[in-house]
Amino acid sequence: MEIPDMDGINQLDRAKVVGKYYLFAIVTALGGFLWGYDTGIIGPTLIFVKPLFHLVPVDVALLVAGTSVFIAIGALAGGPIADKYGRKKLLMVDGVIYGAFAVLTAVSTDALQLIIWRSLIGLAIGFDVVVAAPYIAEFSPIGARGRLVLTQQIMVLTGIVVSFWAGYFLSFSGNWRLMYGLGLIPALILVLFRTYLPESPRWSLSKGRTEEARKSLAKFGIRIGNQGITPQKEGTFRAMFAQKPIRKSLLVIGMWFVFATISGIDVILFYGPSIYKSLGIIGSTAILYGAISEMIGYLSFMVPFIFVDKWGRKTLSIVGYGGTFVGMVLITIGLNFYNGHSHLFIIIPLIFLAMNIYLIFYKIGVTGVIWALQTEGSPTEFRGKFAGIMMALNQIGNFVILFLFPIWSSKFGVFSFFVLEGIINFIAVVFVFLLLPETKGIPLEKTSEVFS
């Protein structure tokens, strides 16, 4: 379905990408930094809060996985809000929530408070992920849409890297409260800079807000006429599900989003330092291993940032999931050898290498595609709702895996869990190869049609 005043949108699609596009994308993606920091910091802090609050496996599972539940809730609620009231308003609200719960988590005095406040940060993340990437996509020219949207993921990865290095340097003092509390600083910066963002021109045009759209487009050097614009009808969930191409994109992209999280990335991210510690590596060094891995993953993400608009979403996905499958196989081999030969020096480097192979390919082919697919599965009037459903599916899968890991590993061991993850990654490769269509180079209003 096309939105009104396609002349203005066509100009936006054909526009030359200049510095202001990247500036607006970076400011929008600051919430991604907070997502990466606030979730990634659990890896370093878990080493300290687990003995301090006497956390049993179920407590650990709730502490790590609880955020995913509220991300799902925030995503489902945030989508309709963004579609009805605009992208910018929700971008402002989630910044306030980020800051408030970062402080409350830092001052927790018992396990229950820690679990509750850390989990509620997920609301801000849920709001942010359903609006940030769609907002960027809605002002991006076609030829740069993929890499501009990936600014969101670059900021997520930056937040994760910063969280691990902050955790490492603060680990010597054991100051886990400051690890959490540092999240307040980027939250304040986010709220300040997002006040200068224009509303999404596509959203304004879809609502018949001519003057607002004119002002937004003018910030990108685009002028539209003074003609009246008829607003579209409200894009309801019922109307969205009534369209066959969107139903198909919900199914295919929804499964892709589930695989993106149950394939094991956050197990390695959040439980990585604890896994290394269980292999005999002391606390600060275990965190350092995670920090080095995240730096390697961060650098490898430059590959999809450069090539996502050239190679396409499907090719990158096949490369990514194929590589994560190989990484999981190597991890299981390393863990199997460790169980019988824990005295061999080579085993720990092998496991470290295997985890990094997994992370490199995940960053290239999964995080390198996820935000493009989230924004390209539906027309403008449904984009917030669509993004909310995708992220809810993603985080439900994430909750299951993160909750399952500490309980499973305490009963059956870490090795068997990674065998399961290897099987999941193999299925993901087959799924992408057979069912995922290509959406690169297609106008944003027509990308959902490829699923028909």
Image (cartoon, rainbow, N blue to C red):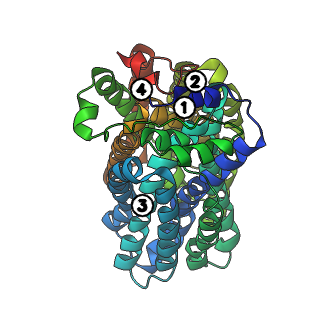
Q: Which residue is mark 1?
A: 369
Residue beneath disc 3: 122
- Mark 4 crowdedness (10 Å alpha carbons): few <14, some 14-19, many ≥20: many
Figure check: 436 above or below 328: above
Q: First in sequence: mark 1 or mark 4?
A: 1
Up-down relation of residue 256 to residue 171 (above or below) = above
Label 1 Cα neighbours within 10 Å, binned few <14 / some 14-19 / many ≥20:
many
- How far apart, in angstroms, are the residues tagged by discs 2 and 1? 7 Å
Q: Is residue 126 visible?
A: yes
Mark 2 element type: helix
Name the amino acid type tagged 1: Val
Label 3: which secondary element: helix
Which circle marks residue 316 in the picture?
Answer: 2
Q: Residues within 10 Å of mark 3 (few under 14, many from 20)?
A: many
| Of the image marks 2 and 1, the number of the one nearer the N terminus | 2
Kind of residue at disc 3:
Gly
Q: State the residue position of label 4.
A: 428
Relative to the observer, which residue lies in front, 341 or 331?
331
Residue at image point 56% right, 21% down: 440
